Image: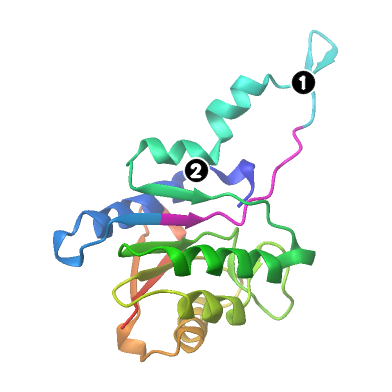
Amino acid sequence: MRDRWYADKRDIVKWGGIIHLLNDKRLGIKKVIQIAYYREDKWPDFNFKENKIKIPEKVLKHFRDIKLIKSLDSRIEVFDQIFEHKTRQQYTDDLCKRLSKMQNTKIVFLDPDTGLKPQGCKAAHVKCKEVAQIFDSLKPNDFLVFYQHRFRDSKWYESRRTQFKDACGVAEERIGTWSANDIANDVIFFFVKKG
C-alpha cells in the first residue's frame, strides 16, 4: 500500500468488513494484522506564493500515516515493513515467521495496492504462491482476508476468486466476500477461514 491511497473511500468498505468480522464473538478473533505491503511515497514540493515548499511532516502524518488505523481498535496491528518488489520473497518469509509465532486467533489482512497478480507481477500485486505460503502459516480458525481492485475484464471478480481459492487450496464455497457498490464499486474483499 502506498501512502497516497490511505484513507480513501475504499478504506471505509475495507475496515467496515474487517471490524464486523472482528466483533463477531462467535469467531473468537483476538487480533487483526494488516499486511500493508507498505511503500513510501515521495511527496513533491508545492508552490506557495511562487516559492517551492515541502509539505510539513505533521500534515503528511495526519493524512497519510497508515499506522493511525490502530486508533480504530486496539486489536489492530500493522505489518509495515517496507515492501520492495525485488525482495518480495524475503518480505513473505519474514511475515510468515511472525504469523506462525502468534497464538491468538486472528485476521490476517493482505492489503496490496491492487490485488492478486495478473499476467505480469508488479509491486502493486501479490503472487498466488505468496498467498499460499501465508495461508499455510496460519493456524486453524484464523482468517485470511484479501483486497482486490477491479481491472479491465468483465469477469475480474470470478477470475480472482478462483485464483484466491486455488492459492488457499480450499473449496469455492469456503470463500466469502464483501463489497459496497454504493461506496466503492471497484473493490471486493475475499476471506476464508483456515480449517
Q: Which residues are magenta?
A: 33-43
Label 1 environment density (alpha carbons within 10 Å; few <14, some 14–19, many ≥20): few
* Residue 9 rendering spot, x and y as whole percentages: 45, 45
* Mark whose residue sits in front, 1 or 2: 1
Q: Which mark is residue 8?
A: 2
Label 2 environment density (alpha carbons within 10 Å; few <14, some 14–19, many ≥20): few
Q: What SS does tag 2 mark?
A: loop
Between 61 and 184, the one lying in front of the other is 61
Verify whether residue 125 appears in magenta: no
Quarter the C terminus occupies: bottom left
* Residue 33 rendering spot, x and y as whole percentages: 43, 56
Q: How many numbered tags mark residues here?
A: 2
- Between disc 1 and disc 2, whose residue precedes? 2
Q: What SS does tag 1 mark?
A: loop
The residue at 60%/76% (across/down) is 130
* Residue 126 rendering spot, x and y as whole percentages: 61, 70
Q: Is residue 136 above or below residue 93?
A: below
Between 117 and 193, the one lying in front of the other is 193
Quarter where residue 44 is shown = top right
Residue type at mark 2?
A: Asp
Residue topped by disc 1? 54
Verify whether residue 34 appears in magenta: yes
Between 109 and 98, the one lying in front of the other is 98
| Residue 146 appears in the picture as rendered | no
Quarter where residue 6 is shown = top right
Residue type at mark 1?
A: Lys
